[in-house]
Amino acid sequence: MRHCDTLLHAACIVTQDDQRRIIENASLAIDKGLIADIGPTAELQQRWQASETLQHEDKLVLPGLINAHTHAAMTFLRGLADDMPLMDWLNKRIFPVEQKLTPELVRLGSLMGYAEMLRTGTTACVDMYLFEASVFEAAETAGLRCLGGEAVFAFPSAAFSGPEADLDATRALAEKYRDHDRLRVAVNPHSVYTTTAEILTACRDLAQELNLPLHIHLAETPSETQICLSAQGKRPTEYCRSLGLLDVPCTLAHVVDVTSEELDLLARKNAVVAHNPSSNMKLASGAAPVAAMLARGIRVGLGTDGPASNNRLNMFSEMGRAALMHKLTGLDPTLLPAGQVLDMATLGGAAAMHDARLGTLAPGMAADCIALDLSEPNLQPMYNEVSHIVYAATGMETRMTMVGGEVLYNDGHFTRFDYPALRQEMRNVRRFVLEASGS
Ligand SMILES: [Zn+2]
């Protein structure tokens, strides 16, 4: 008998391993934050003795979902204004509040975002925002994994005086969290239209110097392409290639307006795309050519984008919408089948995090998993687990969320922070936002 920290028993485990094995009456042995063993419960009980046993025999266990692109702090703007053209929405409603942003507002907004993520089965996210040190503070409180960094702009933000200060903040954050198991820093130029060639080059250099990935909004809309063509004489993707941005490990959010030659380029460069179906639909940005990306072997993760343009941070909604959106826009019901969509939310997300320990439940991988309550009426009866995860589940069936072997959410309770107190603080945040937005 070998000893491990935790034995977790489940009705069924969807492993997302190389063979996409689904094991019934299965267990996970977890030790020091990693999966030590996985297989039928009867076998693991013979092999392992655990300090603690988690009984989820009535639940389906799968890898924690990974949100490949978000601005979690923006929960404080959720539902403030919807159904507006992008530029009106930004200039009249979002920017006036963001100009008055404080580190505390960002911390509280992020913590509420993480509460929603943990509640709906997300264990990791790729984030970009202002006052990112406060985002990290919230992520450290909540306990989930985050790849984040200060957004870099050509102009002053509420947080910093300009691009040099944004990059200094990135460097300081990278130093502070250098050896952190769950928090990692990326260089985050906001987009091609809010930066300059000089700034983008400085971002690439910093990513190379500190060995950090790069995360940018790219080719989100046809109007971005027009702005880039008239300012730089190149389309956004080609412009980034010409500056060497695609030569570092990168996560590209959106990638809606791209040509097939640009997709070939992204495949050659091994870039990771973060697809955001809800945000693209809500802002009428267009449909990213996801099926064409996957056919070329481009790794694609799934993101919610910020809660002001979704309005959820729920990866179950995002999976369902991704699966449906491409069938409609492609007029082809075989596009993005459920298995491919679940791959995007797990393995694609691991690629977007640039973290090979994530996305799969297998020995040696991080013990990041969630348990869904199979007794809920919307999951009756069960023929195909992956179909239910993508099309039938809402995320609210999540009863347990675990990161690195640590339970962070369990049956209505967050283990690391006081959720009722956070809700109380959000009431004050709401008053502040209403005043700041002139509502
Ligand atoms: Zn975004």
Image: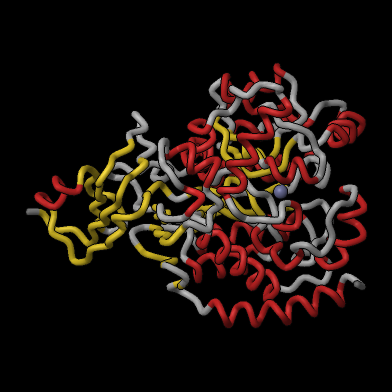
Q: How many marks?
A: 0
Residue 285 shown left or right of residue 427 in the figure: right
Q: Is residue 233 above or below residue 48?
A: above
Q: Residue at x 23, y 52 (%)?
A: 29
Q: Is residue 73 above or below residue 147?
A: below
- Quadrant in the rendering for residue 426: bottom right
Residue 36 shown left or right of residue 246 in the figure: left
Find residue 422 and report its horizontal and vertical position in percent: 60, 78
Q: Residue at x 61, y 45 (%)?
A: 318
Q: Residue furthest left?
A: 1
- Quadrant in the rendering for residue 23: top left
Q: Residue at x 62, y 57 (%)?
A: 170
Tell me if residue 145 can be seen. Answer: no
Q: Is residue 12 above or below residue 142?
A: above
Q: Which is more toward the observer, 6 or 224? A: 6
Q: Which is more toward the observer, 209 or 185? A: 185
Q: Residue at x 41, y 36 (%)?
A: 383
Q: Which is more toward the observer, 181 or 208? A: 181
Residue 165 shown left or right of residue 376 in the figure: right
Give the quadrant of the C terminus: bottom right
Find residue 11 and report its horizontal and vertical position in percent: 30, 49
Tell me if residue 413 can be seen. Answer: yes
- Quadrant in the rendering for residue 403: bottom left
Residue 36 shown left or right of residue 430 in the figure: left
Find residue 189 and report its horizontal and vertical position in percent: 71, 47
